[in-house]
Image: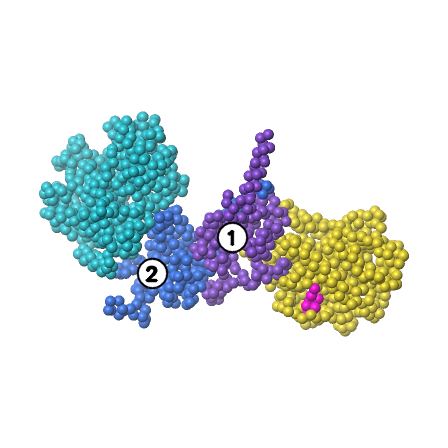
Amino acid sequence: MVSRNYLMNIDCELCTGCRRCAEVCPLNAIEGEQDAPQFINSERCVLCGQCVQICSAYASAFDESLTPRAIKLRERGMLETVKEPLFAAYNVGHALQVKEALASSELYKVVQCAPAVRVSLAEEFGFPYGSLTPGKMAAALRRLGFDRVYDTNFGADLTIMEEGNELVKRITEGKDLPMFTSCCPAWVNYAEQEYPELLHHLSSCKSPQQMSGVIFKTYGAKIDTMDPAKILSAAIMPCTCKQFECTREEMADSGYRDVDVVLTTRELAQLIKDKGIDFANLPDEAFDLPLGNYSGAGAIFGTTGGVMEAALRTCYELITKEKAPRIELNFVRSGEGIKTAMVRAGELELRVAVVSGLKNAAKILEDVKAGRCQYHFIEVMTCPGGCINGGGQPKFLLPEYREEAVRSRKASIYEHDSRLKIRKSHENPDIQKLYEEFLGEPLGHQSHHLLHTEYVARKGQN
Amino acid sequence: MSGTLNSFVVANPNQCIGCKVCEIVCFAVHNKNNQVAMSVGTIAAPVIPRLYLVRGETFTMPIQCRHCEDAPCANSCRIGAIKQEDKRIVIDENDCIGCKTCLLACPFGAIDLLPQFKDGEAVIQANLKEESEFGLEEKVKTIAYKCDLCQDHGEPACVTACPQQALTLVIPAEEKKRRNRQAAVNLLSALN
Amino acid sequence: MSNSIPEIENADLLLIFGYNGADSHPIVARRIIKAKEKGAKIIVVDPRITESVRIADLWLPLKGGTNMALVNACGNVLINEALYHKEYVGKYVEGLEDYKTAVAKYTPEYAEAITGVKADDIRKAMRDYAGAKNAMILYGMGVCQFSQAVDVVRGLASLVLLTGNLGRANVGIGPVRGQNNVQGTCDMGTLPDVFPGYQAVTDAKARRKFEKAWGVKLSGRIGYKLTEIPHLVLQEDKVKAYYIMGEDPVQSDPNAGEVREVLDKMELVIVQDIFMNKTALHADVILPATSWGEHEGVYSSADRGFQRFKKAVEPKGDCKPDWQIICEIATAMGYEMKYEDTEEIWDEMRGLCPSFAGASYKRLDELGSIQWPCPTEEHTGTPYLYEGNKFSTPNGKGQLFACDWRPPLERVDEEFPLSLSTVREVGHYSVRTMTGNCRALQQLADEPGYVQLSVEDAEELHIRDQELISISSRRGSVMARALVTERVKKGATYMTYQWWIGACNELTSDHVDPITKTPEFKYCAVKVERIKDQAGAEQHVRDEYAKLRKQMGVNV
Amino acid sequence: MNSFVVAAPNKCIGCRTCEVACVVAHSSENIFTSTKREIEFNPRLSVVKTAAVSAPIQCRHCEDAPCANACSEGCIVNKEGVIYINQRTCIGCKTCILACPFGAIEMAASYEGGEKKQQAGLKCDDGGKLCFKEKMVANKCDLCLGREGGPACMEVCPTDALRIVNSDVIAGAMREKRRRSVIIRDYSYL
């Protein structure tokens, strides 16, 4: 198991000891005296990257006493051409690794982008907050040299198929309820670390990233008649924990590393600038089919309550076998830390909860431990507001800029969903084709082998 | 105290935690022409703040220009690049020739001499070259930077951005009135 | 000087009266600056803005020729505000009552009318002076070169006595003597009234001692003073011959025209010097002597410090050290005078002067410098005089002195509306024969020399800076270059005396101080006129200068 | 940042020794023993005396040297932190003199082997006689580049009024001044 602490660090040369990171850290994993350099307790840190987002202790380009910038860039796995200022709290990047891979002709480079990336990437090029630019993103990825531009949103639809069915199965069997979502890797780390006894409540589904990854190297390889060994599976995520997730041992059900490397939204922007691509004037291009096609449900995974809403759109029809009367479930769209609701599906009263920000999870987990929790399905997102506010997202200079950005990104995602023709995961034709040709049926043997995983208690292990 | 005195921003060392948000924000607000938008990724030029965090054993706080009424920097500027404009001491960055005199003149160390950037690129001098072993190399223009009280953005950005509200815009005339009143009130309680 | 130069930087207050350290002694000026850095308060009395004025805490800009009024006013303040040191004055000083009456009239307001210095500033100066722990007075030619000079010196000394600033380190009163070794010439008795060691010629006991040592009968009468010669020659025809050694009276004495007349009238003029100069042009005999680098000897610094100096280069040309020339002249005149070396002369002199006895060459080499009095070879010299506050007066007590102010003898009027005072200029020195012929120093300042003019006067006379102008007095007229400066006040002009063409001593008056007969260089009346034909004037200066150089055989 | 020599006005006594030292440091032969009629005496700093101040003024080696940026011939370059005039290519057009706000540049006769250099073509008619005009070039402080012991003027100043200001001195001074400007007292009532 790769130790996690190499991914998240605080540069003691730059840290001024202001401890603003300590305030936002959901795990209080940042220790140190006030005004003295802080350091990250890797046994507690779940790699959510909120500290990286808030840290303002930058390295002045004119302070000769500091280690030269070139060395710091290499330390942080960043491209030399990156011009933005470096801050004390940082996540180790892999842009160099991806750049080399893109340059090599033997590899067959496949990429997937998370739902939250397409509403934030443009901000790194000076676009207004939350600009929705999936077309330019796909065009940029092709110009970077990716052979296949697929999409995590396809994986999201796939996750809904599996997780939706898993929920219905648990409810009908009345076992292991409430069920928690499992797509947020930091939340999984947290559960493994702090509440190992509740691990069986977590959905056994892998995250959309890992599902897409395993499909690319199996089904994808087949339809492209490509030797999976030569496939390089990269993912662009708004998250600093996804890179850790793809290195988990168990994430190799395709016989190879399902996802070889993960870049954050910021790193993708840096790669684009490094290549000299004029992002603003790129034409809109589509994602490659079939594994780049996605529904509105997949698209809204990026924001808090999105997974819940997508799941309910499908579960309703699984349970009642009738079309859901309303697509938009507004109760999950407000901004509070914990939102609860009761959805009537046929005669079943589905009680659901949505947790935004890991700090809000503790209360519900205690209820579950004590058996007092009456919810069936609970969505947990570590970052307040969901992945659109992830650790790898464009970092803002001013606190109010950040709130404004999260609001606009959320609006853009729901706007994007409302515009798509297909808005339920199970109506995604390519998903249906995947099951017919390859997976069989949800929770089936093939799905179980490729799309599901187990969790391991790891109290203070890494 | 006449109302025409210059205001200035001052930090309270007990509130300040040394997080440098003020420095970053000051740079961002002054570099819109360098395509610096809201996010860190859009910053192409090195961060050049106009206030400077000072950290010692027992204190930490930013130091910036006090917009002195008899500004020593302006009086020492041989080409008159430093002027008073609507109650602010402002440096005309295009006139500045980097002669460093104002650096010596300022008792607070509130002025720094750093490269000039336009549209994200360092400004190159028209003619001065630097003799090096590879022949004559272009020379970046270096100019004096100091706080201009956010001349064209209204309220000083550092004051609003400071997470600890450690920075305050002092308006001398009002400040005096406020303190006088406070002193009078204290007097009241002291006497009876 | 009562105290020594290094002590200047440790004084708490420096009262600088008519002395411009920066131009006459940069090394002393350095001490003044160090004193300021160490926190000393600086008060400067000077009509001009000198370098010391620039860093002064208090400047008393008095009108030229009004020193005595100001000194009396200072005494007046010390008395009336009871600032003087009662216990010190009671024990070591006498003449307080007469002093009180003499200065009674000179209230600061009365002095303000004469000197132009604000009354409050006089009071402030004296409060600071009296209040300082260790205060030192420095004065220079701005005090001595007036017709009322001795009185002012004694007046200043009275201020020191009144405040007890004597008999310990970092205090006292110091005339920072002008040229190099001026102090030494007085120590060695080249004055009309004393033998070496300040032993009076009129003192029979001292005279017998010298007669026994030199084996010759010595006169007990006080000799003639330099500035009395013109009268003695032109009016009384009493003096026939002139033996001039290392002096250039035509250049450095006032009323040069008259000095030339005197030299031409005399039957014999001998000039013993190292370079040709204006006086040598009138000499019958010229005895070329060796310069400072070509012989060895002993100098006295302004603070009574004997220091040996050694020969650096072999003399060039047909010249001899001064003492050999004197020996040969004396022998030729029938007095067998022979010495092996300078040490023999020095030891003979030490034997006759009790206060120099301990300063042997050996001791001088060991200690580097000995400040006399130094009675025995064990003694290491006296950095400051009057230890124990014992003074060289009959009863050992300090004598206070004050008298009425006397204006300078020549007043400005409509015809000669500006005052002229001679000053020093850094970079050139003495009578120019040495520095004037040095190519590098010529570049800094060259003939015809400068007249410092105030901005106002220059405007009135339509004179531009660096223009040649003509300046004249009742005694003569010369051409010089205008130096328009903010440092000079309206109505005053200043010239340095070493220039051959712009020779200000053609203009200076030959009024003298009654006691010392020092000429009143610091005040005479002149007028300044613009020269229209500048090119012609420049050419004239070049021609005059070339002519003089040719006459003197100077091929620089 | 370029270094430069600056005088502390309250220490300068206007004695001009720095001017002579500057000439000595830059002249190929000893000006005191030379027997030539005219010696090369081009001090690169000049002592100014006003009512309020006495101080030598010399080049500040500005980072964006206006003189260099005005020099059409490109004779003025930044050489090892010194704004340096290449007097061989200078044509004496005097633009740098206009550009320098400190008046730190003067025109000086150019010497070679102790003799004044004559121009090859230009003659001047002064008073009927036609003779080759001497070559005049721009002259300013070069911080005694390459001189062992650094600037000669600093070495001789009797009152240590001249001191060199380099980036360390400036950085040190800045740090010190900022540290001293910290307000220790509690300002909570602000």
Tag 2 subunit? D
Task: Identify the residue at horizontal 50%, vertical 54% (top origin).
Answer: B85
Color used for chain B? purple
Q: Quadrant of the N terminus of chain C?
A: top left
Looking at the picture, which amino acid does disc 2 mark? Answer: Ser
Q: How dense is the environment of label 1, judged by Cα within 10 Å: few (below 14), some, or many (20 and up)?
A: few
Q: Let me know if residue A96 appears in the view.
A: no
Whether tag 2 and tag 1 are in contact, CB under 8 A, the answer is no
Give SS at disc 1. Answer: loop
Q: Is residue A136 magenta?
A: yes
Q: Between residue C251 and residue C537, name the one nearer to us.
A: C537
User: Where, by quadrant of the figure, is residue C156 drawn?
Assistant: top left
Q: Let me know if residue A395 appears in the view.
A: yes
**Residue range (magenta):** A132-139
Q: Quadrant of the C terminus of chain C?
A: bottom left
Color used for chain C? cyan
Question: Which residue is farthest front?
Answer: B3
- Magenta stretch: dominant secondary structure: helix
